[in-house]
Image (spheres, rainbow, N blue to C red):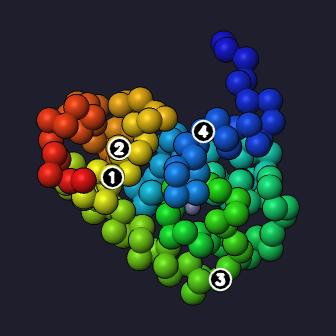
Amino acid sequence: MKPYKWTTPQLMIEGKSIKHPNGCWIWKDYVDKKGYSNIQASIWGKFYKVSKGHQLSYIIYNGEYDRKLLICHACNNPSCVNPNHLYPGTNQDNMGDKILAGSAKGSRNPQAKLTEFEIRQIRDLLTIFNNVEIASLYNVNARAISDIKVNRTWRHVV
Ligand SMILES: [Zn+2]
């Protein structure tokens, strides 16, 4: 068996996320159907008794929080684990996340098309990441990303 790859929880968080130009650290590992990062398989999650990447990231970088509260996203991006975008809040505070999680579900539908905004994001990301990495972020196939890259599709978006 391979030895455990991440020697510190910080390295685990950074290794499992992609730093988006908008500041979000997007979880590139497993996300649940609401779009939340999931770390159940990680030893660090077991150690800190949390199952979500954003909870773990908050504790690692900002310290322990009142576990009766939820860790909410100031950026409204459920798969973001940037500790600076996270804050402990009540269920009420978390409504923004919930609404977004609902819409994220829609965009994860295989029939869902990319938006023009996303096309511009993808073109930015292509300078840093490969087709497969970007495809997994937007839940499309790598061919779709390659088509964007060579301007076979979405040529009208500038
Ligand atoms: Zn964020």
Comes first in the chain, label 3 or label 2: 3
Tell me the residue that label 2 is attached to.
Answer: 123
Q: Of the residues shown, which amino acid type is indicated by label 2?
A: Arg
Picture residue at 14% right of the left edge, 52% below the top: 156
Kindly indicate whether the residue at mark 2 contacts the one at mark 1 (C-beta within 8 angstroms). Answer: yes
Q: CA distance from mark 1 to mark 2?
A: 5 Å
Q: Residues within 10 Å of mark 4 (few under 14, many from 20)?
A: some
Picture residue at 50% right of the left edge, 70% below the top: 76
Q: Residues within 10 Å of mark 2 (few under 14, many from 20)?
A: some
In the displayed orientation, state which residue is furthest to the front.
Answer: 158
Picture residue at 66% right of the left edge, 12% below the top: 1
Please determine whether, in this image, residue 139 is positioned above or below residue 88.
above
* Residue 91 seen in this snapshot: yes
Kindly indicate whether the residue at mark 1 contacts the one at mark 4 (C-beta within 8 angstroms). Answer: no
- Report which quarter residue 104 is drawn in: bottom left
Q: Of the residues shown, which amino acid type is indicated by label 1?
A: Arg
Image quarter for ligand 1 equals: bottom right
- Mark 3 vs mark 2: in front: 2
Q: CA distance from mark 3 to mark 1?
A: 34 Å
Comes first in the chain, label 4 or label 2: 4
Q: Position of residue 57 (x, y in %)?
A: 71, 54
Q: Of the residues shown, which amino acid type is indicated by label 3?
A: Thr
Q: Of the residues shown, which amino acid type is indicated by label 4?
A: Lys
Tell me the residue that label 3 is attached to.
Answer: 90
Q: CA distance from mark 3 to mark 2?
A: 37 Å
Q: Residues within 10 Å of mark 3 (few under 14, many from 20)?
A: few
Tell me the residue that label 1 is attached to.
Answer: 120
Q: Secondary structure at mark 4?
A: loop
Label drawn at residue 16: 4
Q: Using the image as rendered, state which of residue 83 and residue 38 is in the foreground.
A: 83
